[in-house]
Amino acid sequence: MPSNRSLVIPATLAGLALVVLAIFYFADSAAALPSFFPGHEAGSAHHHVKHGLAALIVGLGAFIFAWFQTGPAHRQAEAVGR
């Protein structure tokens, strides 16, 4: 995978936003979520655990993607030269 360091900051910010979103889904009921969140239901005591898990997994995936993008760019050239 080619390294693109310009994607590190956006991927990290997206990962952070998704982890915070997951915390909202785990901590608040559907009625307490902001109205623009998927799963908001007025008067509901239901917690959206699956929404939280999905946000957490995608957020961690964004962190992993950013981590791999910070790797050394010259490793591909070394492997070709062997």
Image: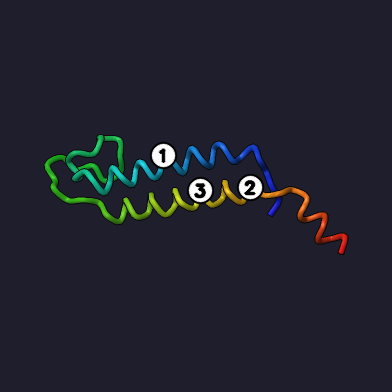
> In this image, 8 relative to 60: left or right?
right
> In this image, 10 relative to 34: left or right?
right
Are discs 3 and 1 less than 8 Å apart at CB?
A: no
Mark 3 falls on what kind of element?
helix
Q: Which residue is mark 2?
A: 69
Residue 41 on image: x %, y %: 19, 43
Q: Earlier in the sequence, mark 3 or mark 1?
A: 1
The residue closer to the viewer here, 72 or 80, is: 72
Q: What's the distance in space between the residues labelled 3 and 1, CA to CA?
A: 10 Å
Q: How many marks?
A: 3
Kind of residue sitting beneath label 1: Ala
Mark 2 falls on what kind of element?
helix
Q: Which residue is mark 3?
A: 62
The furthest residue to the bottom = 82
Residue located 32% across and 52% down the image: 51
Kind of residue sitting beneath label 3: Ala
Q: What's the distance in space between the residues labelled 3 and 2, CA to CA?
A: 11 Å
Residue 19 on image: x %, y %: 39, 45
* Neighbour tally class for label 3: few under 14, some 14-19, many 20 plus, Cα within 10 Å: many
* Neighbour tally class for label 2: few under 14, some 14-19, many 20 plus, Cα within 10 Å: some
Q: Earlier in the sequence, mark 3 or mark 2?
A: 3
Kind of residue sitting beneath label 2: Gln
Q: Which residue is mark 1?
A: 17
> In this image, 23 relative to 6: left or right?
left
Residue 43 on image: x %, y %: 12, 42
